[in-house]
Image: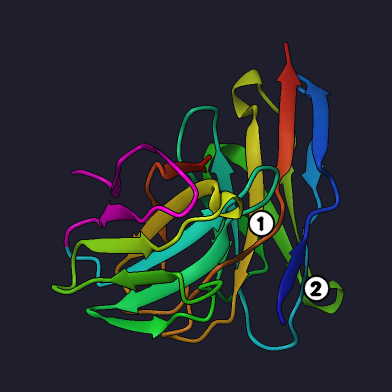
Amino acid sequence: GAGVSQTPSNKVTEKGKYVELRCDPISGHTALYWYRQSLGQGPEFLIYFQGTGAADDSGLPNDRFFAVRPEGSVSTLKIQRTERGDSAVYLCASSLGDREGDEQFFGPGTRLTVL
Amino acid sequence: AQSVSQHNHHVILSEAASLELGCNYSYGGTVNLFWYVQYPGQHLQLLLKYFSGDPLVKGIKGFEAEFIKSKFSFNLRKPSVQWSDTAEYFCAVNEGKLYTDKLIFGTGTRLQVFP
């Protein structure tokens, strides 16, 4: 009965470097979401997958951010040329994806620090 | 664009006091409404949700919320708080359409309950 898992739990990198953040959703959940939470703020939507395809990527801040979900399960959020402003907790959530208003189950997040 | 406002940023209560946390959203169409809670050191979890039907929704741990469509509000209530309710509370909304299930979150309310 594992929940959503995310790795790593913490990532420290230098400005300009490339990072990958991984999300393993609950088994059988077809919908997967990425959010970003900055200090003192609520989570902010980044991208949503239904199966393998990105159904809504309107929250990605710029083209340095990219996410994939090649087999419809695990997803990777990729950030190129990281900037200090990218520092935040990156949250992943999954849901059954077969009805409106499904509960989204959240993972523990990856805390990204860009020095 | 949709937005969610939580007017109480930090609430301090004694045990057994009553709680009401405000939440207002800006969206004229059909919405689903959620309250999520984040206990210290834990990940976000669903407290309750409104999808349709009875506007008074009961959730876990004695919490309830009332959807008032004319006021665009979904306030969270609990008649008697406990020390274990100390947490951050987030109100969220989505558009009530399949395949656009991204959640828009408020900035959160930090609740501290003292024995």
Q: Are marks 1 and 2 on the same chain?
A: yes
Residue B23 in picture, x, y percent from top left = 77, 58
Q: Quadrant of the N terminus of chain B?
A: bottom right
- Which residue shows up at 45% across the image and 43% down it? A14
Disc nearest the viewer among 1 and 2: 1
Q: Decide: is A10 above or below B36.
A: above
In the image, B14: left or right of A98? right
Residue B37 in picture, x, y percent from top left = 57, 43
Q: Nearer the viewer, residue B30 or A94?
A: A94
Badge 1 or badge 2: first in the primary sequence: 2
Residue B28 in picture, x, y percent from top left = 75, 87
- Which residue shows up at 28% across the image and 53% down it? A22
Can residue B103 be seen here?
A: yes
Q: Secondary structure at mark 2?
A: loop
Identify the subunit bearing mark 2: B
Q: Which residue is mark 1?
A: B91
Q: Which residue is mark 2?
A: B72
- Which residue shows up at 79% across the image and 54% down it? B6
Q: Quadrant of the C terminus of chain B?
A: top right
In the image, B2: left or right of B17? left
In the image, B78: left or right of A101? right
Q: Decide: is A70 above or below B92.
A: below
Residue B55 on the magenta span? no
Mark 1 nearby-residue class (10 Å; few <14, some 14–19, many ≥20): many
Q: Secondary structure at mark 1?
A: strand
Amino acid marked by disc 1 = Cys
Q: Nearer the viewer, residue A83 or B99?
A: A83
Identify the subunit bearing mark 1: B
Residue A26 on the magenta span? yes
Question: In the picture, residue B78 is in which quadrant?
Answer: top right
Q: Which residues are magenta?
A: A1-27
